[in-house]
Amino acid sequence: MGEFEAELEEYISQRRKGSLMSFIASKKIEKEQPPEEEKKGIFSKMFGEKPKPQDLKADLKDVAKIAFNAMQRLPPAEVEEFKRSADYAYFKEILAKHDLIK
């Protein structure tokens, strides 16, 4: 009798006893462990590895340039309004924290 037939007989025997769960438990089906690469967190999967500090500073510098270029296209009244806002103060604080402005 082959392996399949033996398992079928065991299944039928357990079924007659009314214990399908004990049959399943007796097989000790183990979940395969994912490869090490698949164990990474969801953010690593989505965005790759954590950026290096020098990359972050370069990115912040690029974002600041984009923001300043966008502000230059605003009417002067809107620029002045933005400069009086808490957002502008926070913007400057972030840039100063990363030594992007003096």
Image (spheres, rainbow, N blue to C red):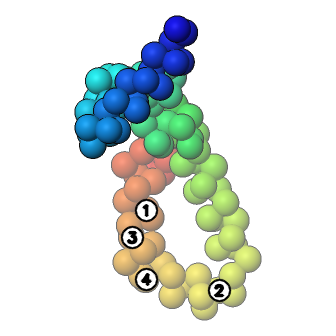
Instruction: Tell me if mark 2 has few (under 14), some (14-19) or many (20+) residues whose alpha carbon lies within 10 angstroms of its own.
Output: few
Q: Does the rendering let one see residue 15?
A: yes
Residue placed at 63% from the left, 49% from the top? 62
Residue labelled with disc 2: 76
Label of residue 89 in the image: 3
Residue placed at 37% from the left, 59% from the top? 93
- Horizontal side of residue 73 vs 8, given as left or right: right
- Give the Cα separation between the discs numbered 2 and 4: 13 Å
N-term mark: 2 or 3: 2
Residue labelled with disc 1: 92
Q: Where is residue 24 in the image (x, y as percent from the top left)?
A: 34, 32
Helix, strand, or loop for circle 3? helix
- Give the Cα separation between the discs numbered 3 and 1: 5 Å
Helix, strand, or loop for circle 1? helix
- State the residue in front, 100 or 66: 66
Residue labelled with disc 4: 84
- State the residue in front, 19 or 56: 19
Callout 1, which amino acid?
Lys
Helix, strand, or loop for circle 4? loop
Callout 2, which amino acid?
Pro
- State the residue in front, 83 or 36: 36
Q: Do the residues labelled 3 and 1 touch (CB within 8 Å)?
A: yes
N-term mark: 4 or 3: 4
Q: Where is residue 5 in the image (x, y as percent from the top left)?
A: 52, 18
Query: Furthest-bottom residue in view?
Result: 77
Instruction: Tell me if mark 3 has few (under 14), some (14-19) or many (20+) residues whose alpha carbon lies within 10 angstroms of its own.
Output: few
Instruction: Tell me if mark 4 has few (under 14), some (14-19) or many (20+) residues whose alpha carbon lies within 10 angstroms of its own.
Output: few
Q: Do the residues labelled 2 and 4 touch (CB within 8 Å)?
A: no
